[in-house]
Amino acid sequence: MNFRLFEKLKSVERSAIVGLRHESPAEHSWCCLMLADFFLSRMDVKKRKIDRLRVYELLMYHDVVEILAGDTQLHPNNVDARKKKEVEEQDAANVLKEKLPVPLGEKFFDLFQEFESQKTVESRFAKAIDKTEAEIHELDYKERWKGWTPEFLIKVKGPFVEEFPELKKAFYELLEYEKIEGYFDK
């Protein structure tokens, strides 16, 4: 059964660590869902016209491509690797669209394209959550912050939170915390 393909998300290793092992995309996606739920519960989603279910679906499916494409760590020393990764992820999306069971293959593909294109408010919010969750995760691994600067984080993550005041406020509070706690002193 091709549905078992989703199970592979549990065994793919991301660059982030959890204790003495690597995080899986399944764990990251679950944490993104929890973080999105937290922020959506603090926002006026009707006024902002944000479809909660669509945000959840985008986050559920956004890293399915890592089944085939793996993960590339965001780091000041490997910015160019992200560009190559985008091509690999698009190739993976095309393959997975055909391998996943109907109708999930199409649904996954459409959601992945929406997430990547950033044309809907839901996709922009989901991407902002994705960027924020990864940074929150790394707070437990201060030793891995070598080479990071506040300026780099503002450049690569700041634009994603700009549209969402609640996330923007949290992002800059997080940045202040990281400065005070010496995360950038590595």
Image (cartoon, rainbow, N blue to C red):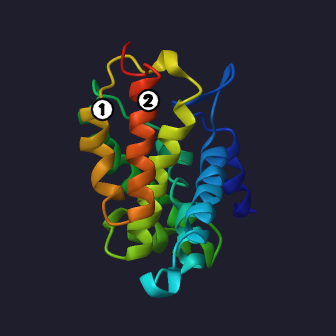
Whether tag 2 and tag 1 are in contact, CB under 8 A, the answer is: yes
User: Which of the two discs, 2 and 1, labels the residue nearer the N terminus?
Assistant: 1
Q: With 97 as the anchor, is 128 left or right in this view? A: left
Secondary structure, mark 2, is helix
**In the drawing, what numbered circle is on residue 178?**
2
- Residue 177 to residue 129: above or below: above
Q: Distance of mark 2 from mark 1, alpha carbons?
A: 8 Å
Q: Residue at x 46, y 44 (%)?
A: 69
Q: Residue at x 43, y 82 (%)?
A: 48
Residue 145 visible at all? yes
The picture places residue 128, in percent across and down from the top left corner, at 42, 57
Q: Is residue 110 left or right of residue 86?
A: right
- Three-letter residue code for mark 2: Glu
Please tell me which residue lies in front, 163 or 108. Answer: 163
Number of other residues with Cα within 10 Å of mark 2, as a class: few under 14, some 14 to 19, many 20 or more: some
Please say if 13 is above or below 126.
above
Residue 17 placement, left or right of 148: right
Who is closer to the viewer here, 143 or 165? 165
The residue at 40%/71% (across/down) is 114
Write down the residue under mark 1: 150
